[in-house]
Image (cartoon, rainbow, N blue to C red):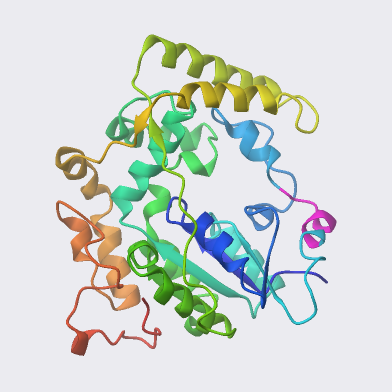
Amino acid sequence: MALPDFFIAGVPKAGTTALHVALARHPALYMSAVKEPKFFLTDGPPPAQGGPGDAKTYREHIWRRADYEALFDPASAGQLRGESTPFYLHSRDAQRRIRAQIPAARLIVVLRDPVERAHSNWTHLWSAGLDPIGDVVQACAEENRRIAAGWAVFWHYTALSRYGEQLQHLFGLFPREQVLVFRYRALIDDPARALDRVCAFLGVPLGVLTKLPRENVTAHPDPTLRHRAVATTLRAGSAVTAALPGHAGSGVIDHLERILQRDAAPRRPLTWQERQALIPRFETDIRLLESVTGEDFSDWLGPRGDSGGLVGTRPTGQRQARNGLPRSL
């Protein structure tokens, strides 16, 4: 069977695409040509309907076993096979499916300040016309209603950022030596060191990868009449194309997204007022994350998160993780 040996399992908007592309350049590794196949998210086809834009998400879902295995057929003998679906960490069912089929799998988890991650996630979908709410705090407040209505997980901004709950479940399934956890800032601030740490974790030669490809910078269109009109058309068109076979209509949707992005300003930074409104949604989980990992994430509760590239902020002599968790970047 051509199944992966390792996964980039989390989290969305934390440099996973750049990490996937970088690892694909290592001769001892083979990364799936489809970056985010989502195979383990379901036991069969994805839902037929959901929130705005879900149709495109579901079209990208590779759910047939033969199609999934075919992604890894081109790997050369001796290469480790990998894929990157950053929703696997969030999905307890996906974690269980991976454990049942690939118990020796290694999982890479990149954590980003949960408030910044949620904001980046919302900005991504707002700029693409796929979130009708132009305020991140209000969009997060709508999350429970969206989940109840069946919106796809990419619209679950706060739920995707609750890493403590997710890692606690993951560590109940996989030995901790099979899981590498490090911060998004490590990739940005010292990519060579971060990539060497990943390669050491996977057991492939170090010093081969030194750079990350440039990440896409999400634009932030102003909420003009044009933006509202194009976004409304895009969401409606996305729902219509869900009923069409294959990728029919996807070109129109992509064209509308390009119109929205045209001449837009770069992503606006999160304000302290917005952070203050959103931090309470994550404080309990951050404390759980600290308990689960034995590391300090208190900087995520302040005015600016991700203050350092290393997991935790304890002095060097206090950085040894508890409970047997390998020391992480």
**In the image, is residue 67 part of the stretch drawn in magenta?**
yes
In the image shown, does 152 or 24 lie closer to the viewer? 24
Magenta stretch: dominant secondary structure: helix
Looking at the rendered image, the quarter that the C terminus falls into is bottom left
Above or below, 119 relative to 98: above
**In the image, is residue 220 part of the stretch drawn in magenta?**
no
In the image shown, does 145 or 293 lie closer to the viewer? 293
Residue at image location 43% in from the left, 68% down from the top: 167
Above or below, 173 relative to 323: above
Percent coordinates x, y for residue 221 in the rendering: 38, 25
Percent coordinates x, y for residue 325 in the rendering: 39, 83
Percent coordinates x, y for residue 178 in the rendering: 53, 80
Percent coordinates x, y for residue 272 in the rendering: 15, 42
Looking at the rendered image, the quarter that the N terminus falls into is bottom right
Above or below, 79 relative to 110: below
Report the label total.
0
Q: Is residue 65 left or right of residue 323?
A: right
Residue at image location 24% in from the left, 67% down from the top: 308
Residue at image location 66% in from the left, 58% down from the top: 40
Residue extent of the magenta highlight: 62-69
